[in-house]
Amino acid sequence: MDQSATAGASPVRERVSAAEWDVRVDLAACYRLFARFGWDDGIFTHNSVRVPGKEDHFLLNPYGLMFHEITASNLVKVDTEGNIVDGGILGEDADIITAGFTIHSAVHMARPDVACVSHTHTIAGMAVSAQEDGLLPLTQKSMRFYDRLAYHDYEGIANDLDERERLVADLGDKRAMVLRNHGLLTAGRSVAEAYSLMAYLQHSCESQIAAQAGGGRLRVPSPEVCEHAARQFDSFGDNQRGNDASFAALKRLLDLEGVAYAV
């Protein structure tokens, strides 16, 4: 698909609600930030967001476009059965990846509290996902996930819809999960929260691999200190203020760099 097809004035903005357009812009910014920081994987992996006022519809990236090409207008709207409701500016040419639908629809269907789901295949994330002990509480950022991180065993490429039941059972009420031998997943109450969780989880994985590569003995704080830090993060995350302010700052960075995501 030619990204030039998404340029110019968007008819999508004219036919969707203001609330939907706002989350389209946020999700497009999320894709661009993932690309900027190297968390993308070609045309694969996904971020999705629930459409406000349409609990059974969510937005997903179109198959064939890389993350640095995603805009508010070329996001594809699908229902929980994977049917394309609105192809965005791509119209009838829009398509999605089955595996992306399987993973994201599972979470959206089971967790009405979740607005946005992010999924990555980063090197650090995949490396930690392949470690038997998973994510270790080695740094302040990793404390955010202390005893709050889910794990889902690898079952192959996620094309089978019956995997959804096991995936959501493993996720439970948590907001972050390691897909073993696969990658990372976060589930936020907003795009800003899903992004923040993924940034912290990604940095935690990078720090772990770097610390292990150093070859020295690793120092792990006591369980009491880890839990105390995790509760501090819980309190920080619950008010959403920090997530929203941080994400707004990152969108200003994209704007300053002239990134055309909000079109």
Image: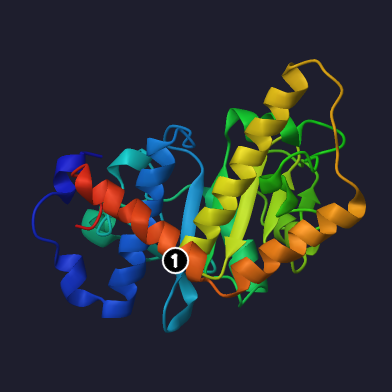
Residue 89 placement: quadrant: bottom left
Does residue 158 appear anywhere in the picture?
no
Q: Nearer the viewer, residue 6 or 232?
A: 232
Q: Where is residue 28 in the image (x, y as percent from the top left)?
A: 34, 54
In this rendering, the answer to whether 130 lies above or below 247 is: above
Q: Which of 122 and 238 is in front in this view?
A: 238
How crowded pointer 1 is (Cα within 10 Å; few <14, some 14-19, many 20+) is rated as some
Residue 150 placement: quadrant: bottom right
Seen at 39% across and 48% down, the residue is 31
Side (left or right) of 181 relative to 94: right
Q: How many labels does the image show?
A: 1
* Residue farthest to the bottom, as pictured: 53
The amino acid sitting under disc 1 is Asp
Seen at 57% across and 33% down, the residue is 122
Q: Nearer the viewer, residue 204 or 34?
A: 204
Q: Where is residue 214 in the image (x, y as percent from the top left)?
A: 74, 17
Q: Mark 1 points at which residue?
A: 244
